[in-house]
Amino acid sequence: MNPEPASRLNELSNKILSYGKENLTDILHVLEKALRLLSQRSRSRVYLEDLTRGVLACSQASGPYADLILLKSFPINNTSFAVSRVYINQEELVMEDAAAQSSPYARELAEKFDIAASYLIPLVHEGRALGVVCIDSGQIGQIPTPLQRDQLKHFMAQVTPVIDQARKYHQQILLARQVDAAKKREAALHMVKSAVRLIDKLALASVLVPAPPGETGDTGLHILASYSKEKETKQLYEDHKLVSLGPGQSLLSRFINASGVITDETLLSPLYFPYLESETLQKRYLTDQLGLKSLFLVPRYEARTRRVICLVNYYTRETHTFSDFEKGLLEEHADMVERAIQEIGGQHIEIQVLAEINDLLQQRFEGLAPFLNRVLSKATEIIGADTGSIALVEQIDERKWLVVEDSEGRVVGAKSKEWLKQNIAPIPIGGSELPREERSLTGFVAATGRPHRIDDTIAEKSAGGFYREITETIRSELAVPVICEGEVIAVICLDSMRPHFFTDEHQRILTLIERMISRHLGDRRRIEQLTTEVNQLRSDVGYKDPKVSSYKLGNIIGNSSKAMQVVDFIQRVAPPLANRIAFWSQASIHEATLGLPSLLITGETGSGKEFVFNNIYSRLNEIYREKIRPGRELPVKKSNIAAYSGELTYSELFGHKRGAFTGAHADRMGILEEAHGGIVFLDEIGDADPKTQVQLLRFLDNGGFVRLGENTTRYARVLLVAATNKNLHQLIEAGDFREDLYHRLTELTIEVPSLNQRREDIGDLATHFLGQLFRIYKKPEESDDNQPTLTRGAREALANHHFTGNIRELRSILLRALFFRRGAMIAEEDIRTAVAGAPAAEPRDQTRKLTEEVAVRIYDDILAGREDFWSAVHQPYSSNHLTRETVLALVERARDDGATTMPKMAQRLRACDPRSSDAEEQKVFFRFKNFLYKTIRIR
């Protein structure tokens, strides 16, 4: 096999092996792709043993007539059928001419489905057959080659154990449903028996329920149970199980539509029909042969949708007027019927749910997505939905969204039968305040914190309701919020291709699943978020250039006395601060004798205050992992006070209650609560408004705080590290900063020196940052060994330069010198040119000019084919080495060159081919649009 198909086959095999027992449909979908690749034919059938029905059921089919083939099953124990014979004998079968077979069944199948030739192989696991795979062709003699057959058998041997496990689980669920259905029938039968005994005049009682979806091609109500003291009456009544709801077909069709929804309000209450012979009856024999004269009909339905739960019929053979007492008795009886079929019938499935989800919670998963995928697969399988998704609540650009896939197309939540739900863009959270095109069921559920369902998506969409179409095949939808500590953190959504599929029982089951997983999901999300933040911090302190020998502690650079003072400060304060953090895990959360620890980092703009914090955190985390919580990460959160104002600042720090302000669609924890037991870094503390200052002072004094819109005091324990480039003494004198808060923040203080105060370190700093920049911006043909170095003159030029922007300014100079250097090395002249390109008197113009220069360089590289969008733009931006302004400038340049639409933009920037019908290429195009619209926020 060629390397490319072999690689694809290995990918498909690994995909199947990664699925759990709940994913039978997904497994068979991937198997069909593998069969197509192995046999080079587009037609296949997969039959699996179904012991609940005693047949080999067709579980997957592709090619012409696939829908009809899926309806065809074969007996398990009858060698007259080729499929059954292969299953029984566990031997492959080659039929080069199906029409020439001696078996009339084989010839009939060949003629009906245009199967001229077929290759059949048994699925065998641990010596026992579990099904049959058929590779079909419409041409005589066209069967897989001997090599292809060997490859097919080898592949099937690899994946059959997973198929067998999923098949057994699927049948277990089907059996559970059958047990529930039997219990419902038994309960209903017991109740109708009691009705006939309850009132002497009753000749027959019955319970009708909506026909299960897919049970028949017709729509209507079917008889769940009936009883008469005369056996012949009961048998004749049940001869026709289905009551049609087609227009004019039956008495009930006057009141109920084909979907089982009451359309005539007179049936919202019990109805009495004194003369049945004068009514339009589907079952005319009720009056003609059974002699039934009157009917008292009690409906039971869902209040919101008016969808019928059950109809309880009470027939008499005499024209009998029921007394008020008898009516009340029968209505109470109908209530008991409803409870019996709903509660007794659903117990087995609920027990199954409890056991299945509890097993999942005991398992270990590599990451959150695999856990969510298993939860979703179980929910989809148990309820019988066609597809579904789990979306996580994410904060994007100061707004909350539901996210299933990230901007790169990676699934961060979960999708079942993902080929039905491709490319799910972030979904805004909100209700009626959203524009119609942004409304969705999941967004509405996340905003309200309550379950909801859509019975008919077409009607919901035409009415401008809360439905967002992902695929036109979905006809009904059910969504339940996942709530942890009063906050919506995710939404589980199930979909069906049939309208009015989901019931109150389904909603109850999904709510049960939500309650079981909410705490676990909340904990896992916090752990993943913390791990991401810690990894980002590690990347900041992790890079070391081999040509620099003055690294200290994490990666603080320099041998100057100022640099050594910073290192000494971190080494001295880290152990006692770690001891205080360790104490929190042992003491009561209300411990507040000495208040909470704090640390203030001061320094000029761009001097590296956040970098120093990262090194402080890195050292504390080392101690935490080694001595306090082995293997765990010290919680950490960062925020910039200057990025918020008013209530948003308060909400960012302390959290808010849903409805506390416009846009507060759900409860939210603040970062001080999220980082409980760890560290919070607040940059630009000098920009805090008076209300925030008051609350921070209170928090530092005793650890207590109140979420915005609440009046309940909560507690958290954190080390608060603040930073500022402002003179807080001057702010205090001006009345803009509280002196008492200043004294609480300055228990420990460190000043980060400017570059002008540590000139002897500039050479090593420049080498370090130049190495980082080169790795991000190097050309495809360049390796790390091609990294340019600074000449002695260049280093001296940098050391003698007067810096006003410190580290930021140094990086900007190095970036310009890297882009526009004249040779393999960066010389003194390159540095002076780079410095001259940034006039100190006009910092905004300087930044704008640099942005344009970088955008032009990137754009030219893309047009010349040296780079593409992903290597030149997406990857550097994701690594925080390219600014949003640069990306916007690049987009404007492309627009100026005619890329006025998103497809043209994708082509111009060499992101993908948006005209391609290939699914992977379309997925890349979706990522491209998502990145520019949601991340960069282009207009």
Image (cartoon, rainbow, N blue to C red):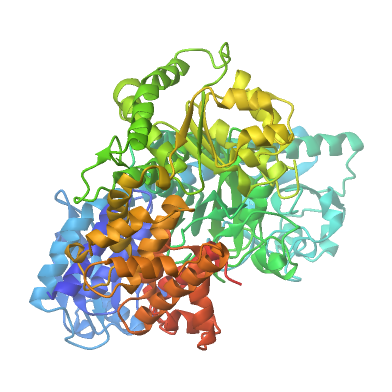
In the displayed structure, does residue 669 sit left or right of residue 527? right
Q: Nearer the viewer, residue 376 or 707?
A: 707
Q: Could you say where residue 84 lies in the image, as x and y percent from the top left?
A: 24, 64
**Number of numbered labels in the structure image:** 0
In the displayed structure, does residue 24 sit left or right of residue 640? left
What residue do we see at 43% from left, 83% from top?
907
Residue 578 position (above or below residue 17): above
Q: Could you say where residue 716 lies in the image, as x and y percent from the top left?
A: 56, 25
Residue at far front of view: 800
Q: Could you say where residue 502 lies in the image, as x and y percent from the top left?
A: 60, 53
Residue 741 position (above or below residue 820): above
In the displayed structure, does residue 617 sit left or right of residue 347? left
What residue do we see at 91% from left, 37% from top?
324
Q: Nearer the viewer, residue 331 or 620?
A: 620
Q: Nearer the viewer, residue 605 or 176?
A: 605
Quarter of the image where one finds residue 482: top right
What residue do we see at 62% from left, 34% from top?
728
Quarter of the image where one finds residue 35: bottom left
Quadrant location of the N terminus in the rendered image: bottom left
Q: Could you say where residue 254 lies in the image, as x and y percent from the top left?
A: 80, 64
Does residue 79 appear in this view? Answer: no
Q: Nearer the viewer, residue 80 or 230?
A: 80
